[in-house]
Image: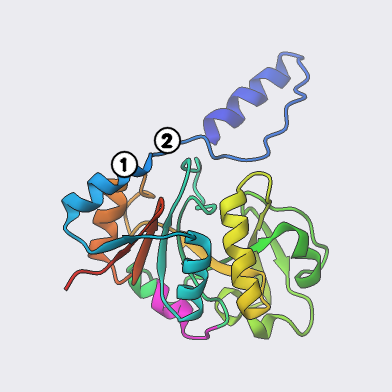
Amino acid sequence: GTALGAAMEGYARLGFESKSHMSHVYWGPEFENDEIEAEIVRSGLPYRRSEDICRDVARLLVDQKIVGWFQGRMEIGPRALGARSILADPRSPEMKDRVNIVKSRELWRPLAPSILEERVGDWFENAYPSPFMNLNLFFKAGVKEKVPSVVHADGSARVQTVSRHTNPLYHRLISEFEKLTGVPIVLNTSFNTRGEPIVCTPAEGLRTFKVTGMDYLAIGDFIVERGG
């Protein structure tokens, strides 16, 4: 992100006008199911193929499970935006502490909401698209109590809006969660542990899953469970 920004700044200083618009940052590598399954087999962890990964993961979240979400091309930059994420149910008051413990982070550290782009105006004041999780918005009155695990102390949140055009799979997952709960938001944090970068490859995802307290890993078309 810094390198791209510096290049665009230099381009502008040279007098050129940039007409490009960056709608997403899913420019990293992605992996086919056969590559993913081979890594799962090597890991020795139990797994199954899902016929509908979004529906199955939405049900796991409703059941208060913490799920690693490894799907499609990796996002670049400092934020997990629904390609290499750890997901949970934001309605649970205990979930913030549980997820921070999974990541070996301080318990006071806030966690972010991913919300369907078309629903952001229903939940936040002065709503504006925030696809890169770089805007802090205040919840509207009467709704923040529904998602206590993603609300900052001042009633705000660092929001990611999710578009069906730029990340259709993640959008469908949140839509499935909304069908079950009435809430178009999931708790989203980066798929890593303290001091480690966000995972990139299936091997990294499986290794991080093994050493944390996540309950499940949704990777490609597969759902991996904890061994033992």
Q: Which quadrant would residue 47 be assigned to in this image?
A: bottom left
> Badge 1 is on which residue?
34
Q: Is residue 228 above or below residue 8?
A: below
- Asked whether 13 or 47 is in front, the reply is 47
Name the residue at 39% across, 50% down: 198
Figure quadrant of the C terminus = bottom left
**Number of residues whose C-alpha sits closer than 10 Å to that of mark 1, classed few (under 14), some (14–19) or many (20 or more):** few
With 47 as the anchor, is 152 left or right in this view? right
Above or below for 192 versus 23 = below
Question: Which of these two is toward me, 58 or 65?
Answer: 58
Dominant secondary structure of the residues highlighted in magenta in the image:
helix
User: Is 193 rendered above or below residue 183?
Assistant: above
The reply, left or right, for residue 168 in relation to residue 68 is: right
In the image, residue 5 lies in the stretch drawn in magenta: no
Q: Position of residue 175 (x, y in %)?
A: 64, 65
Q: Secondary structure at mark 1?
A: helix
* Amino acid type, callout 2: Pro
Judge whether residue 76 can be spotted in this image. yes
- Tell me if 151 is positioned left or right of 74 in this view: right
Residue 202 numbered tag: none
Question: From which residue to which does the magenta span run?
Answer: 92-99
Q: Secondary structure at mark 2?
A: loop
Q: Quadrant of residue 8?
A: top right
Badge 1 amino acid: Asp
Residue 96 counted in the magenta span: yes
* Image location of residue 19, percent across then percent down: 77, 24
**Residue 203, relative to residue 226: is it above or below?**
above
* Residue 29 disc label: 2
Crowd class of label 2 (few under 14; some 14 to 19; many from 20; radius 10 Å): few
